[in-house]
Image (cartoon, grey):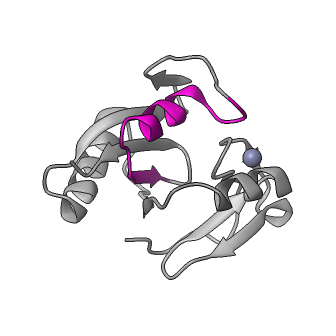
Amino acid sequence: MTTNIPATGPVACEICLKQIPRSAAESEEAADYVYYFCGGDCYQQWQQEPPMHHLGLIISGLGLDFESAQALAKTAASRLAPGAMLLAWYDRPRGRESPEVPECTSKPGWIAYAEGHGGDIRVDVNHGEYVFMFAAG
Ligand SMILES: [Zn+2]
């Protein structure tokens, strides 16, 4: 799904979602997705995690809001799994997340929640501007 990744601008660490300059990020290129990490700790954590489908959407020129991002993410996840169910999300522009649960280890609580509830599809919109976690069901 990933197309036209901008060559500049900050990226979000795959694990902790901290924003980092692209030049300082560690990265790992998969078949159709580039993963970014703020450092070795997050990279190691990522390597130990169960497999997750990653979809990356880059939307520009739309004045994207949460509702549109969610609709696009849902469409993308449904292409992979028709019954995909939304478990958790993150809205960086408004600084909101769901569910609001305490951070468990070094990762945000809503990600831990989704992973603990069978979440296996993650849709990143604009490199962490919005993130949605789905269960394939
Ligand atoms: Zn990190």
Q: Residue 7 or 86: which is nearer the viewer?
A: 86
Residue at 44% across, 71% down: 2
- Whether 7 is among the magenta residues is no
Q: Residue 65 or 91: which is nearer the viewer?
A: 91
**Percent position (x, y) of residue 80?**
24, 64
Q: Residue 45 or 61: which is nearer the viewer?
A: 45
- Whether 111 is among the magenta residues is yes
- Can residue 46 be seen at all in this image of the molecule? yes
Q: Quadrant of the N terminus?
A: bottom left
**Percent position (x, y) of residue 27?**
73, 69
Determine the image quadrant of residue 104: top right
Left or right placement of residue 99 versus residue 101 in this view? left
- Can residue 39 be seen at all in this image of the molecule? no
Residue at 83% across, 66% down: 23
Q: Which residues are magenta?
A: 105-125
Q: Residue 57 or 112: which is nearer the viewer?
A: 112
Left or right placement of residue 126 versus residue 6 in this view? left
Residue farthest to the left, as pictured:
82
Left or right placement of residue 75 versus residue 87 in this view? left
**Percent position (x, y) of residue 107?**
66, 36
Residue at 38% across, 44% down: 119
Determine the image quadrant of residue 60: bottom left
